[in-house]
Image (cartoon, rainbow, N blue to C red):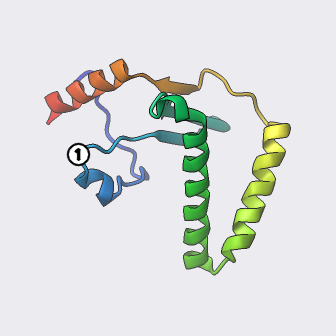
Amino acid sequence: MFGSRKPPPDELPIPQEARSDEESRELIRAWAAHKGLHCSFRENTWGDNERAAWGILLTDVVRRIADAMHERIGADKAETIREIRRVFDERLEAPTAEASAAAKPMTEAHTAAEEAEEDEEA
């Protein structure tokens, strides 16, 4: 069927909490491909709070990474957060690559079309 694809064998699973919440929405996907970062994201999710909300999302992701590294290899959570913050600030000031069309915001119209396609496949 048009637009359908087989998930790659290393695709990350959707968290159970997201599967069980009818109002859950995927907000961002990121891939390392062709020697660069390629992502899609759902912008205009939080209205007037958009910029602050993305900051909160990114800090929550950093904390989850620190937790996971602590559990997996015993890395100090605070040190992991400090190092991520250091590199984050450094790269914001001197990016290794410019953002391009590869970062694709998803619109609500696009989302509705995707949902309709998924319903047809089910």
Q: Is residue 55 left or right of residue 104?
A: right
- In the displayed orientation, state which residue is furthest to the front: 48
Give me the residue at 74% from left, 28% from top: 98
Q: Nearer the viewer, residue 53 or 103?
A: 53
20 on left or right of 39: left
Quadrant of the rendered image containing residue 121: top left
Residue nearer the viewer, 57 or 100 = 57
Q: Position of residue 45 (x, y in %)?
A: 44, 32
Residue type, label 1: Glu
The residue at which mark 1 appears reads as 22
**Which of these two is toward me, 22 or 33?**
22
| Residue 40 visible within the image | yes
Residue beneath the point at 26% across and 52% down: 19
| Residue 33 figure quarter | top right
Question: What residue is rendered at 55% in x and 78% in y?
Answer: 71
In the rendered image, residue 37, in percent from the top left (x then y), is placed at 63, 37
